[in-house]
């Protein structure tokens, strides 16, 4: 590594930004994959891998991917919740890896809700 | 130069008196010999002389006054040292009951308490004492102002090949560097786990520093020991947090368990016991550290198990 | 760069390591592998991040969930439940001491919520061995700003405007100290970071270096630029091996990036750091002793003036700053003097890091704004006193400070107010004592410490402390006499007056403040031969509570002097002639059946 110039600081910052946002728990959007036993049984791990791959391939920095337990709708797993900042969360059900990718591209990146996969708007969780 | 004479028969020592020590209580006559004309000797002489004794005040150096005459202030009152001592010097010189014998030392003491015979050896002054007025002119005019010492011949310190190998890299790193002594001692300490004397002599020669300085530094810091350390050094933390949570009780318990006081090493060189002022692990107080392993939230009842575990680990190591 | 969805921030500070953090790490990595999560979850080793008494701890990000008191066998469950299935494990969380309800989010824990992090800006967020992560948290940005846009005089002015004062204890304005050095025509100049954290009960500097070594390096670079130094030393205690290791690794990384060495950021400014290991002498925390120690001379203090800024190490102008002072600098430069000056009180700006320890629920590092009351530190952040005991006093400033009694709990913490109360800010050790702490014993403890650490140069310190120690020992052992208290006060004042360096000038403080606030306890020891806190061995007796003793024989079997007798299932009794008052019986008794009494023996 050659000597740093002041401009290089920004480049390094950009490079590790994702990790840092992760640590701080803040990001533009958050995708929650429901990973209860039911979720895993119906393929949530595949959804998770697909999403991770998306993030890696598209080099996305400001989206947090996390897990949560069963949302109570076991029959419609695998499901994910997408929380874009300042918008109500959206739940998607009966997913496949391809559907998840589509949701990621449309909703998370472009802000366009994919209505055909969505279950409901808003969260049933007590805030 | 602090011993002083008294008349008390119960206090034998450097006292000398012509009074026979029979059943009748000694009357306050006779003579006392005081050795050392520092502030203590001077004051004793004055007190004795004032109570009617003849005092012989013997002093090794050419002048009386001792260390106090060289001090600036005294503790705890911060009084000026010379203001206290100089009137006493004058009194001492003038007192009819005091005979000053300076530049002299005690050669022989015979007799019994109450009846001593003392031989005092006076060293030559090379000056006629009857004629000298102490004007100081000769001192000012003496051409020899500083004693000249010839360079001492260099003593070569020989090390065993193994020691030499260990030391060479350390010396090479620090030679001709400012402030190299402490880092060098650290490295030796890491290598030997203590500072062996022959190695310190070698360091003193190689880094061209007086051995006294090396010794002073080596003994100033708590991290160094001049004695071989045990294989496992048990350090009991004595930080404030550990103390209020019973650190001193833990230390006592270790002393009992190892059968020795703090600061020692067991005979088989397995365990050493030390205290340390703080490990900075106050959150886990009380803390005990064995070599590099920290044991937090330590309880006295854990001691036997702890010592056993290290002993066994040590045995395994020597077998392997 | 590899993408992970979750980071597990495992605290590997010295303390957590002491309670098994490394075993946890091994197990954690094994379990993650077992669940095939190694591509999704990364384990990061951080410096001290949380409640030090509750180690080993780990924080799961981005979920912001904190776990404490981890044991190896908890790990499989934790990995499966939380990391795989996303169900945080309540049983391993922090439990509120009053509501007894687990708190899930790290930032909701009162200990964390009420702090304000400036010096500890990066605590537990970054991996201390990764310079990139430090840079991503605005690291070295302040340095770039200083080198590009500011003259040294402007930097000094900025720090002076911020009102930053030395965090090592004395509270001298940092800007003024720098100005003395900067305007000194003598060259070369030196910068020394004092990391010889000798005060027992203080561990801020260690934690800062372990958690965030680059903050210190950046701070030193800024300071060096401001005063015109091209060489710096970090004088660090040999007792801190992990901190030394992390600092060496951090300086190596900074050198590789050209952030240490010649022509930094292409500005023509050169600076490098040498790490100097201290060797365990308390007096080396004193500026002039520290300088002598670096020069390789006996570490005895020297008369001031000349101050180090005039004649310091190797006779050259030298600025000595504390670790915490230096780590504040990057934030002040980034956010501006005004921002910093708005925090704290009129004369004490910014925040102070305290190492909270002793008889308190949440011991650990806390960074709070100046002016916060002791009550909030002890009760809100510290979570109060464990086991339902009564609060008695806090001790600040270690062996140079004093005790602050319950009546002054609402005292705002800043340099001046603590001084008025007879204590000092000191380097920031804050030891909480409960009713079981004896104020005579504590005073004796500190005097014993300073007596041993006194370098012996000044008679007042060497002999005065020894005399005070003897009197205190007599009082503790029941041989105190009338007039002892007055004599202690007189000796203490004289020692303070007549000693050369900070050690002797402050060493009597623990006694003087204890006498001032707890005179009754001294009187009780001397007149009634009682130790109200039941600590002083000569004044207490042990006995068995016949009602509580179940006759389990545990104490009898553990007693080192065979002083306890009694049959199985029958109440035991202690033979006072044999009892050595070692406390083992209290330690092992499961029924609280050992009583301690004072002043009742014939």
Image: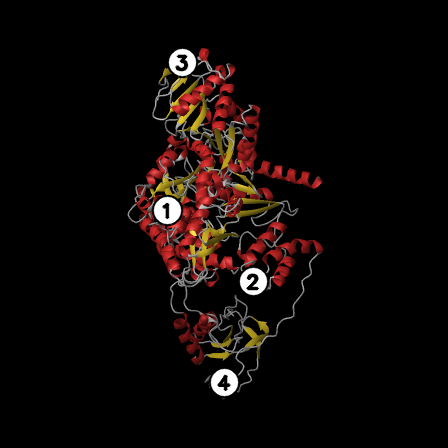
What's the chain of the residue with tag 1?
Answer: C
Q: Are marks 1 and 3 on the same chain?
A: no
Q: Residue at x 38, y 65 (%)?
A: B78
Query: x, y (%) of residue C273?
Result: 49, 52
Q: Are marks 4 and 1 on the same chain?
A: no
Mark 3 to mark 4 CA distance (whole Å)? 115 Å
Q: Which residue is mark 3?
A: A116
Q: Residue at x 63, y 71 (%)?
A: B152
Residue C119 lies, with reference to residue A108, above or below; the image says below
Left or right: where C257 falls relative to C509: right
Left or right: where C82 falls relative to B84: right
Q: Are marks 2 and 4 on the same chain?
A: yes
What's the chain of the residue with tag 4?
Answer: B
Closer to the eye: label 2 or 3: 3
Query: x, y (%) of residue C426?
Result: 39, 49
Q: Which mark is residue C333?
A: 1
Mark 4 to mark 1 CA distance (whole Å)? 66 Å
Query: x, y (%) of residue A29?
Result: 40, 26
Mark 1 to mark 2 CA distance (whole Å)? 44 Å
Q: Which residue is mark 4?
A: B141
Query: x, y (%) of residue A48?
Result: 49, 22
Q: Which residue is mark 2?
A: B213
Left or right: where C599 falls relative to C257: left
CB within 8 Å, label 3 to label 4: no
Q: Which mark is residue C499?
A: none
Question: If the image is split into quadrants, where does the C terminus of chain C sit?
Answer: top left
What's the chain of the residue with tag 2?
Answer: B
């Amino acid at each position: 590594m050659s000597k740093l110039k002041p401009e290089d600081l920004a480049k390094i910052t950009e490079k590790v930004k994702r990790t840092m946002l992760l640590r701080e728990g803040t990001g533009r959007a958050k995708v929650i994959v429901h990973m209860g036993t039911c979720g895993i049984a119906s393929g949530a791990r595949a959804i998770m891998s697909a999403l991770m791959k998306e993030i890696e391939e598209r080099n996305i920095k400001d989206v947090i991917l996390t897990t949560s337990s069963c949302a109570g709708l076991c029959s419609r797993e695998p499901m994910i919740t997408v929380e874009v900042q300042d918008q109500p969360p959206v739940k998607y059900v009966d997913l496949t890896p391809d559907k998840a990718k589509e949701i990621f591209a449309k909703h998370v990146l472009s802000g366009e809700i994919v209505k055909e996969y969505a279950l409901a708007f808003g969260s049933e969780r007590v805030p | 130069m602090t011993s002083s004479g008294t008349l008390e028969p119960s206090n034998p020592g450097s006292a000398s008196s012509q009074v026979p020590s029979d059943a009748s209580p000694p009357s306050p006559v006779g003579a006392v010999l005081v050795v050392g004309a520092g502030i203590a000797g001077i004051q004793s002489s004055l007190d004795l002389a004032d109570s009617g004794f003849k005092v012989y005040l013997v002093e090794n150096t050419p002048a009386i006054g001792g260390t106090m005459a060289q001090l600036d202030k005294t503790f705890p009152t911060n009084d000026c040292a010379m203001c206290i001592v100089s009137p006493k010097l004058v009194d001492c010189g003038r007192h009819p009951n005091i005979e000053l014998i300076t530049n002299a030392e005690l050669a022989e003491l015979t007799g019994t308490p109450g009846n001593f015979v003392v031989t005092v050896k006076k060293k030559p002054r090379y000056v006629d004492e009857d004629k000298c007025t102490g004007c100081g002119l000769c001192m000012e005019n003496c051409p020899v102002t500083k004693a000249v010492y010839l360079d001492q011949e260099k003593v070569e310190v020989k090390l065993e090949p193994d020691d030499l190998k260990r030391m060479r890299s350390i010396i090479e790193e620090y030679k001709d560097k400012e402030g190299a002594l402490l880092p060098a001692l650290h490295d030796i300490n890491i290598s030997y786990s203590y500072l062996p004397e022959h190695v310190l002599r070698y360091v003193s020669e190689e880094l061209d520093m007086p051995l006294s300085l090396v010794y002073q530094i080596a003994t100033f810091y708590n991290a160094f020991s001049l004695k071989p350390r045990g294989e496992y050094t048990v350090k009991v933390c004595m930080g404030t947090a550990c103390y209020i949570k019973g650190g001193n009780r833990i230390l006592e318990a270790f002393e009992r368990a190892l059968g020795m006081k703090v600061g020692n090493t067991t005979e088989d060189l397995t365990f050493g016991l030390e205290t340390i002022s703080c490990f900075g692990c106050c959150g886990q107080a009380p803390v005990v550290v064995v070599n590099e392993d920290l044991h937090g939230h330590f309880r006295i009842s854990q001691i036997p198990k702890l010592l056993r575990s290290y002993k066994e680990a040590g045995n395994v190591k020597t077998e392997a | 760069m590899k993408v992970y969805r979750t980071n597990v921030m495992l605290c590997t500070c010295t303390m957590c390591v002491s309670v098994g953090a490394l075993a946890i790490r091994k197990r954690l990595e094994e379990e993650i592998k077992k669940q095939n999560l190694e591509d999704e979850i990364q384990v990061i080793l951080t410096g001290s991040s949380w409640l030090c008494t509750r180690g080993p701890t780990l924080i799961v990000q981005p979920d912001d969930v904190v776990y404490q008191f981890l044991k190896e066998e908890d790990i499989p469950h934790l990995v499966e439940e939380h990391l795989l299935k996303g169900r945080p494990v309540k049983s391993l969380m922090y439990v509120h001491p009053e509501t007894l309800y687990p708190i899930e989010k790290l930032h909701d824990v009162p200990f964390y919520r009420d702090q304000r992090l400036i010096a500890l800006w990066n605590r537990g967020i970054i991996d201390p061995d990764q310079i990139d992560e430090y840079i991503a948290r605005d690291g070295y940005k302040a340095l770039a700003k200083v080198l590009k846009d500011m003259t040294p005089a402007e930097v000094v002015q900025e720090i002076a405007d911020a009102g930053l004062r030395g965090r090592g204890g004395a509270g001298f304005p940092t800007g003024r100290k720098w100005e003395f050095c900067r305007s000194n025509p003598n060259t070369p100049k030196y910068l020394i970071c004092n990391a010889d954290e000798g005060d027992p009960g203080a561990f801020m500097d260690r934690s800062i270096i372990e958690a965030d070594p680059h903050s210190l390096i950046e701070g030193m670079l800024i300071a060096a630029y401001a005063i015109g130094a091209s060489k710096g030393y970090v004088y660090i205690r040999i007792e801190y091996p992990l901190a030394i290791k992390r600092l060496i690794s951090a300086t190596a990384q900074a050198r590789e990036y050209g952030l240490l060495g010649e022509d930094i950021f292409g500005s023509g400014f050169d600076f490098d750091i040498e790490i100097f290991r201290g060797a365990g002498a308390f007096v080396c925390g004193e500026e002039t002793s520290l300088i002598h120690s670096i020069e390789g001379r006996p570490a005895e203090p020297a008369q001031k003036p000349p101050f180090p800024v005039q004649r310091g190490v190797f006779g050259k102008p030298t600025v000595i700053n504390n670790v915490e002072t230096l780590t504040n600098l990057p934030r002040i430069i980034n956010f501006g003097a005004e921002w910093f000056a708005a925090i704290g009180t009129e004369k004490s700006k910014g925040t102070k890091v305290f190492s909270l320890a002793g008889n308190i629920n949440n011991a650990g590092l806390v960074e709070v704004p100046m002016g916060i009351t002791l009550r909030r530190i002890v009760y809100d952040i510290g979570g109060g006193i464990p086991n339902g005991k009564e609060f008695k006093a806090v001790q600040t400033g270690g062996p140079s400070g004093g005790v602050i009694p319950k009546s002054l709990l609402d005292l705002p913490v800043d340099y001046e107010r603590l001084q008025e109360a007879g204590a000092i800010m000191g380097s920031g050790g804050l030891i909480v004592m409960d009713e079981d702490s004896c104020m005579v014993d504590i005073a004796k403890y500190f005097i014993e410490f300073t007596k041993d650490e006194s370098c012996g140069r000044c008679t007042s310190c060497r002999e005065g402390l020894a005399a005070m120690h003897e009197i205190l020992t007599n009082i503790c052992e029941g041989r105190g006499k009338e007039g002892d208290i007055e004599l202690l006060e007189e000796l203490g004042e004289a020692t303070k007056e007549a000693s050369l360096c900070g050690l002797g000038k402050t060493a009597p403080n623990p006694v003087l403040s204890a006498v001032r606030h707890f005179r009754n306890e001294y009187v009780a020891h001397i007149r009634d031969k009682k130790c109200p806190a039941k600590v002083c061995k000569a004044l207490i007796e042990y006995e068995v509570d016949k009602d509580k003793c179940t006759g389990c024989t545990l104490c009898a079997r553990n007693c080192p002097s065979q002083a306890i007798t009694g049959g199985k299932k029958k109440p035991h009794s202690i033979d006072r002639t044999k009892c050595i008052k070692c406390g083992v019986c209290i330690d092992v008794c499961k029924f609280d059946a050992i009583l301690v009494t004072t002043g009742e023996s014939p």
